[in-house]
Image: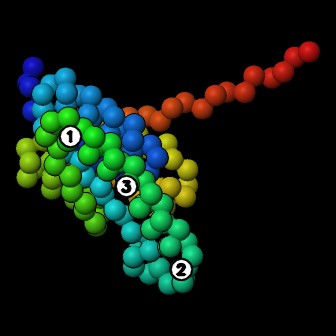
Amino acid sequence: MEDINRILVVSRMSKYSKKALHYGISLAKKYRAKLYVTHVVHDPFGIEGWNLPMPSLEKDYQNLLMRERKELDNMITQEKQGGMDIDVSIREGEPVKEILSIVKDESIDLVVLLAHEEGHLEHFLFGRSNEDLIRRMPCSILLVKKEPQAIPVPWEP
């Protein structure tokens, strides 16, 4: 079995990214690996052919990204202060291309991704690229699922 020396966590700056980052940190500590975290920013408002002005939705999207990034950055800062080797980058553009570029350039051994379980709005805002990544990924992948929703139990008297 090959050693895991370089781990990449792909953050979509959503609330579920914290769970993926937690897994990445935990695995990096266990394997004494270098951790790379990239925030992939997919701009749904830059889509060619998109011509409906939606300044309010775009502003809300930017606020959401800032809030989630701040929380992720706090987690990363805390681990760096504890001595962990973490390289953070922000990439804008087509997510598959950007992620594959990092994997190749940094010789990544394991990629930690969120499993796609978001709602339709999050798919629109953050893109849908896992299927393409999984097919083209030259290394191992860990897909992190969000917490399962509680199934309501019918009330019986």
Residue at which label 3 appears: 69
Closer to us: 100 or 23: 23
Q: In this view, does 122 lie to the left or right of 134?
A: right
Cβ–Cβ below 8 Å for labels 3 and 1? no
Reply above or below: 134 against 54.
above
The amino acid at mark 1 is Gln
Instruction: Please say whether residue 128 is visible from this viewpoint.
Output: no
Pinpoint residue 135: horizontal percent, then vertical percent: 26, 44
Closer to us: 157 or 82: 82
The amino acid at mark 3 is Arg
In front: mark 1 or mark 2? 1
Reply above or below: 54 against 96.
below
Q: Distance between the residues labelled 3 and 1?
A: 18 Å
In front: mark 3 or mark 2? 3
Element under disc 1: helix
At 55% from the left edge and 30% from the top edge, which residue is drawn?
148
Q: Which mark is residue 94?
A: none
Element under disc 2: helix
Residue at which label 1 appears: 81
Give residue 108's quadrant in the image.
Answer: top left
Q: Distance between the residues labelled 3 and 2?
A: 21 Å
**Sequence order check: which comes first, mark 3 or mark 2?**
2
Cβ–Cβ below 8 Å for labels 3 and 2? no
The C terminus: image quadrant: top right
Q: How far apart are marks 1 and 2 (CA)?
A: 38 Å
Q: Is residue 89 left or right of residue 146?
A: left
Residue at which label 2 appears: 55
Element under disc 3: helix
The amino acid at mark 2 is Pro
**Sequence order check: which comes first, mark 3 or mark 1?**
3
